[in-house]
Image (cartoon, rainbow, N blue to C red):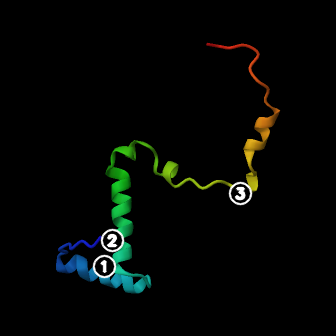
């Protein structure tokens, strides 16, 4: 989706300078900033940001293999 946004000259100049310095595009910076803003202002923002950025620890292995060791419940609790 294309979106046109008016930026004051000072902000546009700073954005251009940062994009050039970071060797990236202005679009990439604006997209990243908007994603972060939405993360903090959308209804799901009640959850910590780290929750949505979770990456598993590969060295920990697959814990689901331990489920095989669990037996069935001895009685129906309901």
Residue at image mark 1: 15
Image quadrant in which the C terminus is located: top right
How many neighbours does mark 3 have within 10 angstroms: few (below 14), some (14-19), or many (20 or more)? Answer: few
Report the Cα–Cα distance between label 2 and label 1. Answer: 9 Å
Image quadrant in which the N terminus is located: bottom left
Q: Is residue 10 above or below residue 75?
A: below
Q: Indicate the secondary structure of the residue bearing disc 2.
A: helix
- Residue 19 is left or right of residue 54, and the answer is left
The residue under the point 60% across, 56% down is: 55
Ranked by sequence position, the earlier of labels 1 and 3 is: 1
Q: Are marks 3 and 2 in contact (CB under 8 Å)?
A: no
Rendered location of residue 40, percent (x, y): 36, 52
How many neighbours does mark 1 have within 10 angstroms: few (below 14), some (14-19), or many (20 or more)? Answer: some
Q: Is residue 64 above or below residue 12?
A: above
Rendered location of residue 69, percent (x, y): 82, 33
Residue 30 badge: 2
Q: Is residue 45 above or below residue 16?
A: above
Report the Cα–Cα distance between label 1 and label 3. Answer: 37 Å
Residue at image mark 3: 58
């Amino acid at each position: 989706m294309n979106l046109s946004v008016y930026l004051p000259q000072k902000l546009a100049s700073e954005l251009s300078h940062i994009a050039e310095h970071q060797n990236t595009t202005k679009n990439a910076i604006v997209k990243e900033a908007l994603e972060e803003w939405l993360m903090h202002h959308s209804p799901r923002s009640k959850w910590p940001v780290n929750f949505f950025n979770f990456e598993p620890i590969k060295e920990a292995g697959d814990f689901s293999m331990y489920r095989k060791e669990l037996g069935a419940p001895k009685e129906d609790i309901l």
